[in-house]
Amino acid sequence: MVFIWRGWGLLTIPLIGVVIFAGLFAALWVTETLQLPDWTKIFEFAAIFLVAGLLNWKLGRYLNRTGLPGARHDLFFIRMEYWSIPVFLAAAVLLASGLYSL
Protein backbone atom coordinates (compact mmCIF):
# COMPACT_ATOMS: atom_id res chain seq x y z
CA MET A 1 0.00 0.00 0.00
CA VAL A 2 1.27 3.44 -0.87
CA PHE A 3 1.09 6.14 1.78
CA ILE A 4 0.96 9.75 0.71
CA TRP A 5 1.74 12.22 3.45
CA ARG A 6 3.13 15.65 4.04
CA GLY A 7 4.99 16.78 7.15
CA TRP A 8 4.18 14.65 10.20
CA GLY A 9 0.88 13.40 8.78
CA LEU A 10 2.11 9.80 8.73
CA LEU A 11 2.18 9.96 12.54
CA THR A 12 -1.62 9.63 12.49
CA ILE A 13 -1.54 5.87 11.82
CA PRO A 14 0.77 4.78 14.65
CA LEU A 15 -0.68 7.32 17.08
CA ILE A 16 -4.25 6.11 16.74
CA GLY A 17 -3.19 2.47 16.40
CA VAL A 18 -0.96 2.39 19.48
CA VAL A 19 -3.46 4.24 21.67
CA ILE A 20 -6.30 1.92 20.66
CA PHE A 21 -4.21 -1.25 20.99
CA ALA A 22 -2.76 -0.30 24.39
CA GLY A 23 -6.12 0.95 25.63
CA LEU A 24 -7.99 -2.18 24.58
CA PHE A 25 -5.34 -4.40 26.16
CA ALA A 26 -5.47 -2.40 29.41
CA ALA A 27 -9.28 -2.32 29.44
CA LEU A 28 -9.53 -6.08 28.98
CA TRP A 29 -6.95 -6.65 31.69
CA VAL A 30 -8.76 -4.35 34.15
CA THR A 31 -12.15 -5.88 33.32
CA GLU A 32 -10.89 -9.41 33.87
CA THR A 33 -8.83 -8.56 36.96
CA LEU A 34 -11.65 -6.69 38.71
CA GLN A 35 -14.22 -9.17 37.37
CA LEU A 36 -16.44 -6.43 36.01
CA PRO A 37 -19.54 -7.42 34.06
CA ASP A 38 -19.12 -7.89 30.31
CA TRP A 39 -21.43 -5.01 29.40
CA THR A 40 -18.87 -2.52 30.75
CA LYS A 41 -16.34 -3.46 28.04
CA ILE A 42 -18.23 -1.68 25.29
CA PHE A 43 -18.17 1.60 27.23
CA GLU A 44 -14.45 1.20 27.91
CA PHE A 45 -13.84 0.63 24.20
CA ALA A 46 -15.84 3.74 23.33
CA ALA A 47 -13.79 5.79 25.82
CA ILE A 48 -10.54 4.46 24.33
CA PHE A 49 -11.59 5.42 20.82
CA LEU A 50 -12.56 8.86 22.11
CA VAL A 51 -9.14 9.32 23.76
CA ALA A 52 -7.33 8.21 20.59
CA GLY A 53 -9.35 10.65 18.51
CA LEU A 54 -8.76 13.50 20.95
CA LEU A 55 -5.00 12.91 21.05
CA ASN A 56 -4.79 12.86 17.26
CA TRP A 57 -7.01 15.95 16.99
CA LYS A 58 -4.94 17.95 19.50
CA LEU A 59 -1.60 16.93 17.96
CA GLY A 60 -2.82 17.64 14.44
CA ARG A 61 -4.19 21.05 15.40
CA TYR A 62 -0.97 21.90 17.22
CA LEU A 63 1.26 20.87 14.33
CA ASN A 64 -0.84 22.60 11.68
CA ARG A 65 -1.11 25.85 13.64
CA THR A 66 2.45 26.22 14.94
CA GLY A 67 4.39 25.12 11.87
CA LEU A 68 6.18 27.21 9.32
CA PRO A 69 3.98 29.25 7.02
CA GLY A 70 2.63 26.93 4.35
CA ALA A 71 3.71 23.76 6.18
CA ARG A 72 0.91 21.20 6.38
CA HIS A 73 0.72 17.87 8.10
CA ASP A 74 -1.65 15.58 6.24
CA LEU A 75 -2.19 11.97 5.24
CA PHE A 76 -3.74 11.17 1.85
CA PHE A 77 -4.30 14.92 1.32
CA ILE A 78 -6.47 15.14 4.46
CA ARG A 79 -5.20 17.16 7.39
CA MET A 80 -4.02 15.17 10.36
CA GLU A 81 -6.73 16.35 12.75
CA TYR A 82 -9.56 15.42 10.39
CA TRP A 83 -8.58 11.73 10.60
CA SER A 84 -10.01 11.87 14.13
CA ILE A 85 -13.56 12.22 12.81
CA PRO A 86 -13.90 8.52 11.81
CA VAL A 87 -12.49 7.56 15.21
CA PHE A 88 -15.08 9.78 16.93
CA LEU A 89 -17.81 8.17 14.82
CA ALA A 90 -16.58 4.71 15.83
CA ALA A 91 -16.73 5.78 19.48
CA ALA A 92 -20.29 7.06 18.97
CA VAL A 93 -21.35 3.78 17.34
CA LEU A 94 -19.82 1.77 20.18
CA LEU A 95 -21.53 3.96 22.76
CA ALA A 96 -24.88 3.73 20.99
CA SER A 97 -24.63 -0.05 20.66
CA GLY A 98 -23.70 -0.32 24.32
CA LEU A 99 -26.66 1.79 25.40
CA TYR A 100 -28.97 -0.12 23.07
CA SER A 101 -27.88 -3.48 24.51
CA LEU A 102 -28.72 -2.49 28.09
Image (spheres, rainbow, N blue to C red):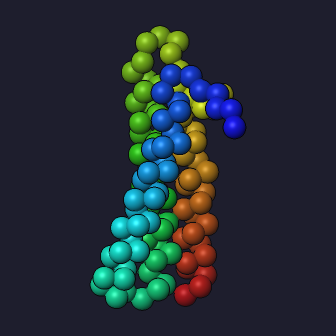
How many numbered discs, if any? Answer: 0
Q: What quarter of the picture does the C terminus occupy?
A: bottom right
Where, by quadrant of the figure, is residue 83 drawn? top right
Residue 36 in the figure: left or right of residue 5: left
Where, by quadrant of the figure, is residue 48 drawn? bottom left
Residue at x-position 48% and y-position 35%? 11
Residue at x-position 61% and y-position 76%? 97
Image x and y of residue 94, in percent: 57, 69
| Image: 53 above or below 46 | above
* Residue 81 in view here: yes
Where, by quadrant of the figure, is residue 101 drawn? bottom right
Q: Residue furthest front?
A: 1
Residue at x-position 47% and y-position 86%? 38
* Front one among 86 and 18: 18
Q: What quarter of the picture does the N terminus occupy?
A: top right
| Image: 94 above or below 11 | below
Residue 48 in the figure: left or right of residue 78: left
Image x and y of residue 61, in percent: 45, 32
